[in-house]
Image: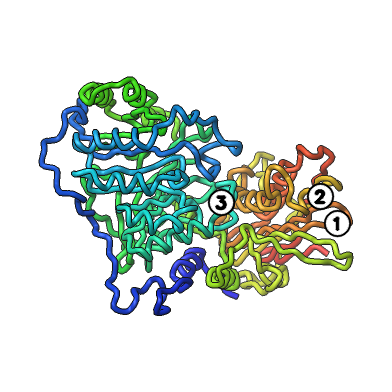
Amino acid sequence: MAAQPVSRVVRRVLRAGVRSCSSGAPVTQPCPGEPVVEMPSRPRPFLGERAAPFSAFLTDSFGRRHSYLRISLTERCNLRCQYCMPEEGVPLTPKADLLTTEEILTLARLFVKEGVDKIRLTGGEPLIRPDVVDIVAQLRQLEGLRTIGITTNGINLARLLPQLQKAGLSAINISLDTLVPAKFEFIVRRKGFHKVMEGIHKAIELGYSPVKVNCVVMRGLNEDELLDFVALTEGLPLDVRFIEYMPFDGNRWNFKKMVSYKEMLDTLRQQWPELEKLPEEESSTAKAFKIPGFRGQISFITSMSEHFCGTCNRLRITADGNLKVCLFGNSEVSLRDHLRGGASEEELLRVIGAAVGRKKRQHAELFLMRQDSPPALPSTFRNSLCVQVLRHRVSFSSQIVTLWKGGGVPQVPLVAQQWLGSSLPQRHFSSHPDSDANPKCLSPTEPQAPAASSGPLPDSKQLTHVDTEGRMAMVDVGRKPDTERVAVASAVVLLGPVAFKLIQENQLKKGDALAVAQLAGIQAAKLTSQLIPLCHHVALSHVQVQLELDRARHAAVIQASCRARGPTGVEMEALTSAATAALALYDMCKAVSRDIVLAEIKLVSKTGGQRGDFHRT
């Protein structure tokens, strides 16, 4: 069955009529006689315009007026994103040291009085704070406050959004870094992909337009999903915002993970050359674009490659009451201590004004980036980023929509349980959960396009990566014809009885070992040319990694399949995928047993190319 892009799957999920109004009309349609709810593009002031001149306390030495305040309601979060915090979490501030609801409102009232007209509630995850609805309702009463927004991971959004909208919430940003359920669980170390999708659906249903979706783009993790995210905007009122990865000490990553705005834009223009730039609003952090005829739009937050420090109008109050004038800055001043010390409004304003006055022209990491950032990649490599490696077939799409309609929860990842003759449950894992239903997918016997040659050539008796003088050399494939290439490789991990049982029952403390190994294999296939020195970069069109438990040997059997159309084969991609999946499985189990053996890493089959097909007997 033909492959179907992930974006189409998600669009069908979001647009499916899974809930109805009293008349039975789909949620994306108004009930008969009910007006369509449209959120204004510029939210109306709640209690009138502010006429007073802008406060000198919120104006820095470079003339920047800070009218946007971000308030963290909590340090806690119900996810553990790989790039944000360690799996065990972070040390939390004692509750007594956090701002109370009254202190939050007191500070908000003071800032709005001085000129702030937009407040965004953040975290941690703000929607896990029990009184978040009441805080929004209290903020709405502040005269001069035009916008109340919230940034959320979306897990609790569908449940709380109707109350939040009634309380006065006018803008929503939802964080979502992948459209692949298994990868979502890998990134955030928790389940919940379906809840985020439900939250996006609910926001659209309630009339928020646009619904902003924040996607942090990280090289080697999700840059291959750019096109799928953009495709969502064709039929949905979304503003998909691609955020440049911002390295900092706490996430232990580096600048090599960053995909620049220009690199992302180059990738998108290969698919949509008609992409149009939209006018930028004053103090906006986003560069907005739109594809003609699409309902939504896309934006880029270029905090690293093209900073917006010169027009920054943002201040931040942390959950424990510290004022930060720059996200990257280390300097903080405790407003909480002054509040609890009995400071007057005038004294608080002097403290705030002094902090704002010390704000630097730009954040310090920009200087480091000029020294440490990798050079721009050649366009031939950038173009290959548009290749969609994870493709979900129609049956998987239908499965998600069916589960959604029936109120069910799609399992993430989907693990098939099969009962063998011994009645022992065997766990099987595949990057395509319905692979057993269509055994021909990437099968060695699947018909392939014939190579452009009169017949297969004999095996070479010389090493192709060595020149006549014995020096290493990269093979020139420039004059080879493009053909359909498919390769299948396998590996076996002999786990031993203890690790085998824990994997079988999914009881490892580190999490689902099969899911992690599968994703490691997929990522390795894409990065083969960076790992194997003389391999050409191949624009893969399909990667599939399957893991099956073998009870008789207490082993995991791995099979990796890669597909591409080009002048060179994909055997190395398949072998690297299988080997890396095996290594990841070892890493997941090494705390349980050191007596684990990686074995039988081998090429199973290859098709396409001038030298003909190969099938291991």
Query: Which of the 4 quarters of the picture holds residue 532?
Result: top right
Q: Which residue is mark 2?
A: 500
Q: Residue type at mark 2: give it.
A: Phe
Residue 51 against residue 239 in the figure, above or below: above
The answer to whether marks 1 and 2 mark residues whose Cβ atoms lie closer than 8 Å is yes
Q: Residues within 10 Å of mark 1 (few under 14, many from 20)?
A: some
Residue 454 in the figure: left or right of residue 345? right
The part of the image, by quadrant, that contains residue 129 is top left
Which numbered tag is attached to residue 605?
none
Q: Name the quarter where the C terminus is drawn.
A: bottom right
Q: CA distance from mark 2 to mark 3?
A: 36 Å
Residue shown at 30%/53% (left/top)?
A: 168
Q: Is residue 368 visible?
A: yes
Q: Position of residue 124 (x, y in %)?
A: 46, 40
From mark 1 to mark 2, how far is it between C-alphas? 8 Å
Q: Classify 449 as above or below 152.
A: below
**Is 19 rendered above or below residue 210?**
below
Marks 3 and 1 in Cβ contact (< 8 Å): no
Which of pointers 1 and 2 lies earlier in the amino acid sequence?
Answer: 2
Query: Type of residue at label 1?
Result: Arg
Label 1 secondary element: loop
Where is residue 231 drawn, in percent x and y?
Answer: 42, 64
Which residue in the structure is indicated by mark 3?
A: 537
User: Which residue position holds label 1?
Assistant: 551
| Left or right of residue 518, residue 594 in this image | right
The residue mark sitting in front, 3 or 1, is: 1
